[in-house]
Amino acid sequence: MKTSIIALASALLVATPAWADDAADDANTDNRDIIVTGTKLSGDFGAKSGIPIAKVPQSIQIVTADEIIEQGAHSIGDLLRNVPSANPGYSRVGAYQSFSLKVRGFLADQMRNGIRQRYYEDVDASALSNIDRVEVLKGPSGVLYGQSAVGGIVSIITKQPQDNQFGTFAVTLGQYDQKMLTVDMNTGLAPGLAVRITGEVERSGTFVDYQDMNRKNVAFNLRYAPSDSVAAHLVAEYVERDTQRNPGLPIKGTVQSNGVRPLSRSLYLGEPAVDALTANAPMVQAWVDVKLSDNWTVTPRLQYQEFNSSFLQIRLRAPDALDPTTITRNGRIGREDDSYTIAQLDLSGRLVTGPVTHKLLFGYEYDHERGRFTQSNLTNVSSINVLTPVYAFNSTQPTKTFAFDNFYNVDGHALYAQDQIDLTDRWNLIGAVRHSWIDAWDGDWKGATNNRAKTSTTIWQIGSTYQITNALSVYAGYNTGFDIESTGGARTRTGEPLQPEKSNQAELGLRYHTDGFRGSVSLFQIKRVNAVTADPVDPDFSINAGEQRVRGVEVEGEWQVTDWWQLNAGYAYLDGKVTRSNDGIVGKRIGDLPEHSFTARTNVTIPGTPLTLRGGINHITNRVLVDGSDVILPAYTLADIGVGVDLKPVRIDATLSNLFDERYFTASGNGFAVYPGEPRTFSVRLSVGF
């Protein structure tokens, strides 16, 4: 890491207060509230780690339910604009937003209440109504959570029932005919028994022609604590979305010139008469904390979820060789139906050995995944002229030819253990290890197995936090992860199964906390290793020989300037490149990774009034489209302003996003198309509480 970068990070920590991880007032923070981003949050990261947020040896940022409302967020991607090292991906007009969300240059996985998801989050990226807070843990973190993306974990903690009675009804109206109704109702039914119901219905248009957004979600949350030694939780959620499968816009005419004129952001280049994307997912989570003694607790957990989707998709391909305003296309029609069950059994407790206290966690996990994907290819999809588009399927019906009807199954088992060691009142260590056994196979539906891969892998984590003073602490950590999704569809020349891709991260950081200021700075290197790349003997096959690396620095924090004025900001420098590959891209930039990013927000509550003024800015420098690409996605700067009026029990929140109507584009996941960013948009939310 260059000295100038370290100096810049140190300067920003002092000169640009921003919000970040909170350092504890003293080392004994296990049973104390942790203050992060101005909000009291008790408990541990990810709902099951047992590690207090201030002792996690990795950078964490948190976004609360109130901040979701204040920022007028439309999706999880919008929330990641608060994280300087995160790429918020494309807007909700694109399908499956989670495939575009990145942290520190790599994809990030989503969890819910400490249990990882499997496509659930891809149904509706705007389903925010049951979220209490979002914790962003940066870097691979698979020891407790199993296979995970390289970039980190987006840990979603859902709203928990409370003993008292309250509720909120809200209506949101905005541009593009936005209409949304949100409800949150809570009541205590009996001593120790409480229920909370949340839900949302939206019927809106979007800034893209022909594309609507019809979506709904509902959640039932139950907590039953009949005694001090037993606490049971049930979370049942259902999400559903019905929209068009937007193909995006071509490279020519958006981020590169087509020789005629730039394309409108509202242009739809699919087939609006037949395009469709419908998806739904039920999910049930249940866990029980059973206190065996003063020091030991056993927690069984169970999650069942489905992902069901049908689609007709038109895909943009290369421009016509003689006319860059004519884009070739193809298409497919099909459906996917998946079910996913995960069961965990954790034993956690304390053990004192002389002057040293151990906080232990032992666990077992079982995964059972069953998936089916059916596809036919469309045979009469024609090219389209982007200047004068003619939709072929307005006058004729699509024809198709069968492609495949396949299954994909996974059975997995894992053992894991974690030890938090308090060496002194100020110094603690964390060590953890996980070994996973994975059996994955696929083939023709109700037919023979075509491919089967039995693999196993071990990952681990070690870290430490030392409290230098009551205000300043230092942490360091090394953690690893693994992922089987990227290797599942690839094949080796010899027929042997590919091993899981792995990742690792080394990080060193400082956290500083006073009554009015919280800040942190971190230096890190994160690697994706054992990655899939072409076989040099036969490029139609793959081997585990690729590697990508990102080195960076992050500065973030929060400054409470006065009782009524708050500033937060963050900066990230990310140097990412392909370090090993057989695809001819060694030394080139990693796709969709900005070298510099900056975010800042401010809230000003006018003294003596119910009025709060808000504003924010988010800047991202240019990125290459995909790994090693020569296509550049230009830099962009987004600004938003807002106002809140709290007239209890009535509250009004209005937001004007993309204030200067910046024209920008985001990666779509392939080398042929991009997604347009949302133009200037106004919305207002009126809520009534009781």
Image (cartoon, rainbow, N blue to C red):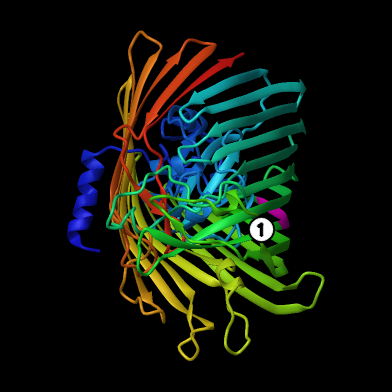
Who's the residue at 52% across and 31% down the image? 65
Farthest front residue in view: 395
- Residue 36 position within the rendered picture, expressed as x and y whole percent measured from the top left: 43, 36
Can residue 490 be seen here? The reply is yes
- Residue 227 position within the rendered picture, expressed as x and y whole percent measured from the top left: 77, 32
Identify the residue position indicated by label 1 in the image: 362
Q: Is residue 340 magenta?
A: yes
| Residue range highlighted in magenta | 337-348
Q: In this image, 62 relative to 232: left or right?
A: left
- Residue 425 position within the rendered picture, expressed as x and y whole percent measured from the top left: 45, 46
- Residue 325 position within the rendered picture, expressed as x and y whole percent measured from the top left: 37, 58
Camera-side residue of 395 and 421? 395
Q: Is residue 229 magenta?
A: no
Quadrant into which the N terminus falls:
bottom left
Camera-side residue of 105 and 302? 105
Please give the count of numbered marks on the rendered protein: 1
Who's the residue at 58% across and 71% down the image? 458
Quadrant into which the C terminus falls:
top right
Q: In this image, 9 relative to 76: left or right?
A: left
Could you classify mark 1 by the number of other residues whose Cα lies within 10 Å: few (under 14), some (14-19), or many (20 or more)? some
Who's the residue at 67% across and 78% down the image? 453
Secondary structure under badge 1?
strand
The vertical placement of 127 against 611, above or below, is: below
- Tell me the kind of residue under disc 1: Phe
Camera-side residue of 144 and 353? 144
Can residue 49 be seen here? The reply is no
Camera-side residue of 224 and 664? 664
Q: In this image, 83 relative to 572: left or right?
A: right
Magenta span: chief secondary structure: strand
The vertical placement of 143 against 685, above or below, is: below
